[in-house]
Image (cartoon, rainbow, N blue to C red):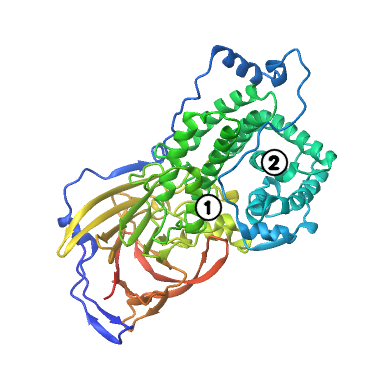
Amino acid sequence: MNAPTLGLKRADTAKGKEVDQSAIPLVADQEALVDDAGPAEDLGSDRALVVTDFEPPSISAGERFMRMAYRMGVSGSTLVAPFRKPARPRLQATVESPLQGERAAGMALRAGHFYVYGVKAPIAQVDFGPTAKHTPPFDRVLHGFTWLRDLEACAPRQQCTSVAERVLAAWLAVNPKPGKGPAWKVEYAAQRQLAWLVHAPLILSTKDKALRSRVLGALEETARWLDRNAARAPDRLGEVSAWCAIIASGLLLPEGKPRRLFGEAGLIRALGELVGDDGGVLSRSPLAQIQAIEMLVELSACYRATRREVPEAIETVLSMLVPPLLALTHGDGGLGSWQGANAIPADRLAALIEASGVRVRPLKEARGWGYQRLSSKPAVLQFDASPPPLSRHARNGCASTLAFEFSHGDHRLIVNCGGAAAAGGQVPIRVEQGLRATAAHSTLILGDANSTAVLLDGKLGTGVGEVEIDMRPIKLENGGARRLEASHDGYAARFGLLHKRILILRDDGSELRGEDVLLPSGRKGKRGKVPYAIRFHLGRHVEARLNENGRSASLLLPDGALWQFVTGAEALEIEESMWIDGNGRPHPVQQLVIQGLASRGGGNFAWLLKKMG
């Protein structure tokens, strides 16, 4: 589809004068400038995510028999020392984890409060029982004991043990045995077990022998419970958590070799079903990617604590997990807001990468991970060019296909709202589904409907089935650029239209041209019209002002830089929006909106984002 050129005048509000622009060609007119490349790549829903295969560590025939017998229910003490009494529970090593906790959350604990996504909850008033009603973020912290890492980060260990013992005693008082409720969700139980083992000096330095005995007994009992329930986790990330806790228990508790062998086989199998061939987890969630890295880092620390070599497969997976995560970093070093994640800040991400020990560059060729990254320093463009995750993998799944984020230097100009996973802190639970909707992302929406159905419990329904993508360099009159084109079929069944988005980023990062195209999905276009809206959520510190022509807006950045947004549509509007920061705090922001009625026979809408001066 060829489109006409667009002649515009843009107002330079910073300098108080109008700047005459030559005709701005729409993106479709760049076809003649494109170098030859192969056909567009079709990422169907069956190909978009590819399961990776890994091999468990090689073991002897005797160890294979030991693992098989343990899986069949023979106790570890019987297999390791059949003629001795079972060893008393104890820890065989002290783990030094390279992961850093959040000091602010640790300080709040010492002051008597849990601190979760900006919300404080007095320890004395928290109900740890199985019938207590907490939001998901609080359940994870309370029952997963992830707060132990934060507590250890805030002060010398001897100043923190009393707080840890107080909370632990309160938790054990109402959860003496495995049972029901959130405490015994497989993932939370696994996180708790791993946290107790890694941060054991915080909870086992007590002079109270009765409490120490209860803790050691709980460690053994939880390990046995995980042995039986690891495979019952609702998704692969929860299962990987369980296998990591099982292996750590086998390393650090007495007579644990059979458990370790059993856990290693289970972990390698589960990792192969969690991670795609490019290292991205199948949920496509940056938060899930971070959690997987954290678990493998702590598990590796457990191996080192017992002077055992980390299995090669675990090190390989860890090295695969880091590049996709780095691909979602902006110029400020923080993460973009994708699949429910909030914008994790640069210092927290840098600390995680440092702890992993992996030194690599961001992923360039994303297939299963699905996020395309164009970096034209100092500009970074992130683009969701893949079908959303399947419902069985999704966590806080979002209908974000063909959305993009764009930053220039340390400033984010175009963002997504993000933060669905933080709902239950300062972000109200009631807006969680709204944050997962297509309208919460910088893309086109038809009929105020999601491109993929957003369901409860973070799952996704039908919608986008396949995405076609093509990326290539092109030549412009005064420089080079890269052209990224992708289309999806999420609206084909309801409205008979395909959405194609074309983005062109100049090599110097000073200009981003875009065009959203609607194409009939069948041989004959349908009659009538459908409402459309193209939303561009603006960064937190971007100040937008409409120009007099009503078709452009001036975007002023904190450093004084001025950008112009221009569209060929009849009108451009500014509306309110929301952006969730790395600490789970919501901030009011603005959004630019192009909206109207689109013909069911198709249409195209061009726009331009350009740095002035």
Dot 1: what SS?
loop
> x and y percent of residue 485 in the render?
29, 53
Figure quadrant of residue 302: top right
* Precedes in sequence: disc 1 or disc 2: 2
Residue at horizontal 55 percent and vertical 44 percent from the top: 294
Mark 1 → mark 2, Cα distance in angstroms: 41 Å
Tell me residue 430's x, y (percent): 62, 61
Q: Which residue is mark 2?
A: 200
- Residue 437 visible in the snapshot: no
| Percent position of residue 596, x then y | 38, 70
Relative to 551, is 68 on the left or the right? right
The answer, for residue 513, to whether it is visible in the render is: yes
Q: Amino acid at mark 1?
A: Val
Residue 273 place in picture, x, y as percent: 49, 33
Image quadrant containing the C terminus: bottom left
Q: Amino acid at mark 2?
A: Ala
Camera-nearest label, 1 or 2: 2
Disc 2, SS: helix
Q: Which residue is mark 1?
A: 454
**Residue 277 as seen in the image, left or right of residue 470:** right
